[in-house]
Each structure stands twice: as C-alpha cells, then as structure tokens.
Amino acid sequence: MGMMTSQEYKESLKSLKPVVYHFGKQLKSIFDDPVIEPHINAAAETYNIAFLPETEKLATAVSHLTGEKINRYTHIHQNVDDLIKKVKMLRVLGQRTGTCFQRCVGLDGLNALYTTTFEMDKKLDTNYHKKFLEYLKYIQNKDLMVAGSMTDPKGDRSKRPSEQVDKDLFLHVVEKKDDGIIVRGAKMHQTGIVNSHEILVMPTQALQKGDEEFAVSFAIPVDTKGVIHIFGRQSNDLRKVENGEIDVGNKKYGIVGGEALTVFDNVFIPWERVFMCGEVDFASMLVYLFATYHRQNYGGCKTGLSDVLIGATLLAAEYNGVNTASHIKDKLAEMIHLTETLYSASVACSAEGYCLSSGAYFPDPLLANVSKHNITRFIYEIFRISHDIAGGYIATMPSEKDLCCDEIKGYIEKYLKGVENVPAEFRIRVGRLIENMTGGTAQVEAMHGAGSPQAQRIMYLRESNLKLKKKLAKIIAGIEEK
Ligand code: SF4
Ligand code: FE
C-alpha cells in the first residue's frame, strides 16, 4: 500500500476504535462528533495536497529506506531542501485550512527518534535503531498519521520525576516482561491524537540517574487497550454542537488542533515497538532534537494562518468602507511585515540546517528557537492589529440564529451592514472567522505549542556563543587582559 488520499485516510480511521471521552460521555465514534470532525478534515488536507499537481512536489518525498514515493509527513529529512520544503508545505496547509493540521508533531517525533536511536545503538550497542527503522517503514508504507506524545503532566515542577509523590505524573515503566513493558501515566495537550493512527511516546525532559523508569519511548496504535483520550474544550466549542455554520468561524477545519489528555492506564507495549527503556542519558538528546524540529515549524504553519487572517481583516475593512484609509493601509502593511518576519526565521533555520551523524538533516537550533519565540510575540500583535482594523462589532455580533428569526432578521440585515453592496451576512461571516481565529484557545496554542517562551530563552543562552561575542567586543574595544 502506498500514499493514502484524504478519503482513504478518513476511511482508515474507521477501523480504529479509540476510547474517547468528550463532554462527560464516551463517544461511539469520533465521526459522530461535530467538535472532532473539523480536525479530521484539517488532517485530511495533509493527505490531499500530496495528490494536487500544484503542491505534490512539496508534500511528497522519496523514502531513503525504500526508494518509494511517500507523503512528506513520514519522511526523514535528507538535505536542506527537505527542511525548506517542510516549512513551505506547512505554510500552504495553513493557507488552505486556516488552522492546525496536527500531523507535524508525529513527523518531528519520527525525525528526532531516528537520530536518537542511531546514537544509542552506536554508543550502547542496543538494537533500537534497527527496530525503529522497521517501524518507520511500516509508517511510510501505510502512510499513517502519528501523534507525537511528549508533554507529561509534571505535577510539582520543582521536583524531578522520581521525586514526585505520585510517580504517574510522569509516564513511566511499571513492569518489564519477556514480551514487552507495561507503562502508566499520561500525556497532555495531545494534538490530533484522536484522529491519528499511532501514538509515538517520548520523554518530556532531560533525565538523570535515578529517573530510569521515566526514560521510555515507544509506539502503539491509538486504540491500544488501556489508552483513554479525554478531548479538551475549546473556545466556542458549543457553537459546533448547535449545528450552525457562521458562528463557528471555520466550520470545515476548526480553530485549533483538537487537543486531548491521553491516559495510559497500565498499557502493554511489545518490545519491538520500544525505542528507549532506561537510557536516561539519551532523554535530553531526544527532547532537544524534537523541540528543535517542532520549533522550526511555527513560522510555516502560523504564517499560513496569518495569510488567511490578513485576507479576512482586509475584507472586514472593505465591508466597513475603510480599506482606503491610510492608517488602515499602514496597519495591513505591519501585519504583512510581521508575517514575513515569522516566515523568514523558519526558512533561515532550515537553510542553515546540517547533517547529523545519522545522516538525517537538522535545522539550526538557535534560529529554530527564534522562529518559535517570534510567534509568541508577533502572532499576538497580528491578532491585535486585526481586531483594531476590523472594529468592535467582532465582539458584539448577534447569533446566526437571529439571522433566521423572522421577527428580527430585518433589523440585523439593516443595522449590521457596512457598505451598500455587501450583505450583513458577509460582514458577520468574516467577523466570526476573525473572532474564532484570534480567540482564547488559538492564542494560548501560539504561546505554548512547541514549548513555552522560557524554554526558547534557555536555548538562546545555551546555543549562542557568548564567549565569542565577548571576545569580539574585547578586540574592538582594545581590551587586552594579561
Ligand atoms: Fe503543525 Fe503548526 Fe499544528 Fe504544530 S501548531 S501541529 S506545527 S500545524
Ligand atoms: Fe502545536
């Protein structure tokens, strides 16, 4: 079997039976749920663009393992061009969906584990890389969607995993058996996990001696016995349950990634799918590689969203009759400047990428952190300018049900209208898109997805050559220390 179409992806999910809870009930199927459906559609676009003539080159690659054409979402980067194509692909997907299409976390997990298992086998004489290559071939051949699972609940942040009163606050191995291991714990903020095929678990942070049971990495199907997904609430999610269209803003694709809390209640993992078990010294490498690959992305996907938001903001300005005002043009120019600045960092860290010992390519870590850190600031500024231009009606529009209510719809059509030739409904539609794209859940994701801003600041100090900078200053200032 080769690459799946978007329809085949959706069909393939039907053979899985993940345990998913939402609004206090277990779902019979993820397909019955109007809150989850948009996330399936968004992820399906990662399959769709592999078949479109205009995007096929970006969205496909040749497997270095099999020589087959594969979806880029299952590819191990082989050169700088692969790294740049990844960013370009994310921008295109952001433009097409206006939201998070979820599949990148698994792609970054695969790339991070590729090198980490290679290094472990080299230094420790283990067989993790061999097992991982078999798994990778399986993912590539079947074109599966992998959810990357990294963030543990972490409990008391001042304590290490082994110091927690409740050890389950970090996912850990509770038993080793002849045929596999049993794990218990949970992973938070699991983007797209309920509509993925596989879960790829990695440790959440660097570990030390004494933390061995927490140094665990493995892959299992999302519907493995003992795995329970509790789907998260999102801003305005009840609007999706109302069966409406306008008020949800982006009915087809949703507004964020469909995050869940995933519980591992004594889950069995066969040894052939275990890629780390006790090697504490390699947890930091895995986290570092994963975080860098994921931070590379944000100037790709989020600039795609910004393109949609700039378009929506310009439309709102036109519908309000202010699009030719000079201060509006200035503000739009500022949105474009910020967006392209975000994009530049992602392209730059890819262009400065290099080959690791495993043969896989890796983006420049300092610039990848800049890329993600820029998002935590500039996306808020882009949202702020959008609200500024669009106007206060974004916060006070009536419900779409009022547009269907005979007694009052005439008032809405009359008083919610802007310029003469545009119906009030268009103005409300674009207002709702802006409201939902810039609302609570989407903002928090931009801040904390791929690591909180403090994590990037730590990397700045680690990755910058401060010694060299001091030396440069001393040379120019003429300071010669004895
Ligand atoms: Fe991909 Fe962006 Fe979503 Fe992360 S936030 S999974 S990089 S689309
Ligand atoms: Fe994310």
Image (tube, helix red, strand yellow):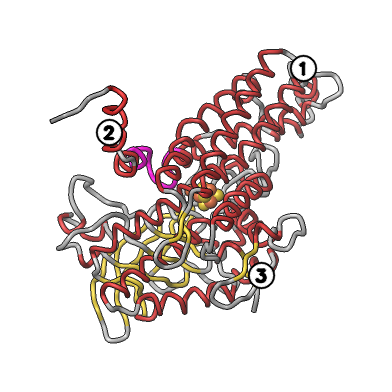
- Please rate how many residues cluster around mark 1, counting C-alpha atoms within 10 Å: few if below 14, some from 14 to 19, many from 20: few
State the residue position of label 1: 321
Residue under pointer 3:
4
The image shows residue 47 at horizontal and vertical percentages of 65, 62
Q: Amino acid at mark 2?
A: Lys
Identify which residue is drawn at 47% across, 79% down. 134
Residue 458 in view of the camera: yes
Q: Earlier in the sequence, mark 2 or mark 1?
A: 1
Which amino acid is tagged 3?
A: Met
Residue 272 is situated, as x and y percent measured from the top left of the image, at: 38, 81
Toward the bottom, the furthest residue is 178
Helix, strand or loop at label 1? It is loop
- Residue highlighted by disc 2: 471
Is the residue at mark 3 in contact range of ligand 1, meaning its CB lies under 8 Å from it? no
Query: Between residues 218 and 187, which one lies in front from this camera angle?
Result: 218
Mark 2 element type: helix
Image: 165 above or below 300: below
Residue interval drawn in magenta: 447-457
Residue type at the position of mark 1: Gly
Please name which of the two marks, 2 or 1, marks the residue nearer to the observer: 2
Would residue 453 be counted in the magenta stretch?
yes
